[in-house]
């Protein structure tokens, strides 16, 4: 079977690029939304802030991107008591939250397609 | 039933006693925890043995404290912050049954390798999950192609049956735990002035010595949920690079690939864990996140090597 170099390049740059996008988005969220939320939650004693830092930022970005997650999710309701993250976030913050979620989804799609492609012999990245 | 309370910062033994509903708790607590002074502040993560309802001595809890090192208790404190004490003990029991302890030395990337290997042991449950997923996909396929109502209702029934089967398989995993520890933790509820905290969240019910043993083991390797695993992961990756250098290979390329792999593994592990937490629950969430982290780690490391080759040559 012929190995397609362009496909290899696409998959490798795509996967690493997605990770890069996720990290850039999470860093942006941590310096903007996370800080504002911390100040906001100081006046809400019933809300338990998640630890560790990284896990909290990921949770916040998912809460903004997935509507009503903090209301419907039994883990999130324990921490954030149904707090409306999406209306609290500003437009750039929302954009970065969605960006990180979509980059993760695209990464999973690349992941799921890379292994069969390697198995069929279209690419040779040394996965198997 | 006796229990273990993991302290938060600023707790004193007196404040724990005063704010409890149980009037007899004060004397029992002091007799069970003679090493703690009543007025001084307790350290965050320090464990207090709570008395049982029938005034029995918390021997299982004492056995747990004897078996655990201070670092294990710190791990447990971190874990109970993320999940409740009940869930921590359930996870300890379930992971012991899946044999995670035996493969803990292989843990890699946010608890990835070991937990990924555990998926093979939990295969009957994962197969049930796959069956449910397939049934759901079939149902949506029929729905999108406007199938006849009879076909649609049959597909719906299939989805319901698959869901039931998945529930049974998961319940089997946790049945043993719930038989041992019925939820009777309301007596330990504490309401604090200003910041109501349910003490049951941080209280771990320990009734049997086997439960104490599995919790002690879990506390030792359960740091997979915290910073310790990152250090261990880093060590494994350092070894891979060092091995490459000793063999005369291109170790710079390996170091680059493993570095990016570690960063990506952390991100993807945490992201999938947070993503999966809701619908699947904590136990399956960790196992699936581990599996995702393992296969994504391979892809990222290989991809980075490829990118390095393309850029360098």
Image (tube, rainbow, N blue to C red):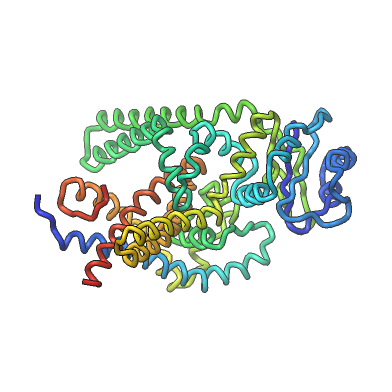
Q: Is residue A51 left or right of residue B157?
A: right
Q: Residue B279: percent from the left, percent from the top?
A: 46, 44
Q: Could you say which is closer to the camera, residue B239 or residue B160?
A: B239
The picture places residue A70, in percent across and down from the top left corner, at 53, 54
In the rendered structure, the answer to whether residue B170 lies left or right of residue B133 reads: right
Q: Is residue B53 left or right of residue B270?
A: right
| Quarter of the figure with residue B262 | bottom left
User: Residue A16: x, y in percent?
Assistant: 32, 63
Residue drawn at the location 61% of the way across and 48% of the way down? B79
Taking the view exactly as shown, the residue that stands out farthest to the left is A2
- Residue at 81%, 49% (x, y): give it: B16
Q: Residue at point 55% right, 48% down?
A: A75
- The answer to whether residue B252 is visible is yes
B129 with respect to B44 (left or right)? left
Q: Quadrant of residue B91?
A: top right
Q: Nearer the viewer, residue B53 or B305?
A: B305
For the residue pair B142 and B62, the one nearer the viewer reads as B62
Which percent across, then down, holds residue B162? 37, 30
Q: Is residue B224 above or below residue B209?
A: below
Q: Residue at x 48, y 69 (%)?
A: A29
Above or below for A65 versus A31: above
């Amino acid at each position: 079977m012929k190995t397609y170099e362009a496909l290899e390049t696409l998959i490798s740059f795509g996967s690493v690029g997605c990770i890069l996008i996720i990290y850039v988005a999470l860093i942006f969220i941590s310096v903007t939304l996370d800080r504002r939320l911390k100040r906001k939650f100081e006046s809400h004693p019933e809300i338990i802030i998640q630890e560790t830092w990284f896990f909290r930022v990921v949770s916040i970005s998912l809460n903004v991107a997935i509507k009503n997650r903090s209301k419907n999710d039994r883990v999130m309701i324990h921490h954030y008591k149904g707090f409306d993250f999406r209306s609290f976030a500003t437009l750039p913050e929302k954009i970065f939250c969605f960006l990180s979620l979509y980059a993760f989804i695209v990464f999973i799609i690349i992941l799921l397609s890379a292994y069969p492609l390697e198995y069929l012999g279209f690419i040779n990245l040394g996965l198997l | 039933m006796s229990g273990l309370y993991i302290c938060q910062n600023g707790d004193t033994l007196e404040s724990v006693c005063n704010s409890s509903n149980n009037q007899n708790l004060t004397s029992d607590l002091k007799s069970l925890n003679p090493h703690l002074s009543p007025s001084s502040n307790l350290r965050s993560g320090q464990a207090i043995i709570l008395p049982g309802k029938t005034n029995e001595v918390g021997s299982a809890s004492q056995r747990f404290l004897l078996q655990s090192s201070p670092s294990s208790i710190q791990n447990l404190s971190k874990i109970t912050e993320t999940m409740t004490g009940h869930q921590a003990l359930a996870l300890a029991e379930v992971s012991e049954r899946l044999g995670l302890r035996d493969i803990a030395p292989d843990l890699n990337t946010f608890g990835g390798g070991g937990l990924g290997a555990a998926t093979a042991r939990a295969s009957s449950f994962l197969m049930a999950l796959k069956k449910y997923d397939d049934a759901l996909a079939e149902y949506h396929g029929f729905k999108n192609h406007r199938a006849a109502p009879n076909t649609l209702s049959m597909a719906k029934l299939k989805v319901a049956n698959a869901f039931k089967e998945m529930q049974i398989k998961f319940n089997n995993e946790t049945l043993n735990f719930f038989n041992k520890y019925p939820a009777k933790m309301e007596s330990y509820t504490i309401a604090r002035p200003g910041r109501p905290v349910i003490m049951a969240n941080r209280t771990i019910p320990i009734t049997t010595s086997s439960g104490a043993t599995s919790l002690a083991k879990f506390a030792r390797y359960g740091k997979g949920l915290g910073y310790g695993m990152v250090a261990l992961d880093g060590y494994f990756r350092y070894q891979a690079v060092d091995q490459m250098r000793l063999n005369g290979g291109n170790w710079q390329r390996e170091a680059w690939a493993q570095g990016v792999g570690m960063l990506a593994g952390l991100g993807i592990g945490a992201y999938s864990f947070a993503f999966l937490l809701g619908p699947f629950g904590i136990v399956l969430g960790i196992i699936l996140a581990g599996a995702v982290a393992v296969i994504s780690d391979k892809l990222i490391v290989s991809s980075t090597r490829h990118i390095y080759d393309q850029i360098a040559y």
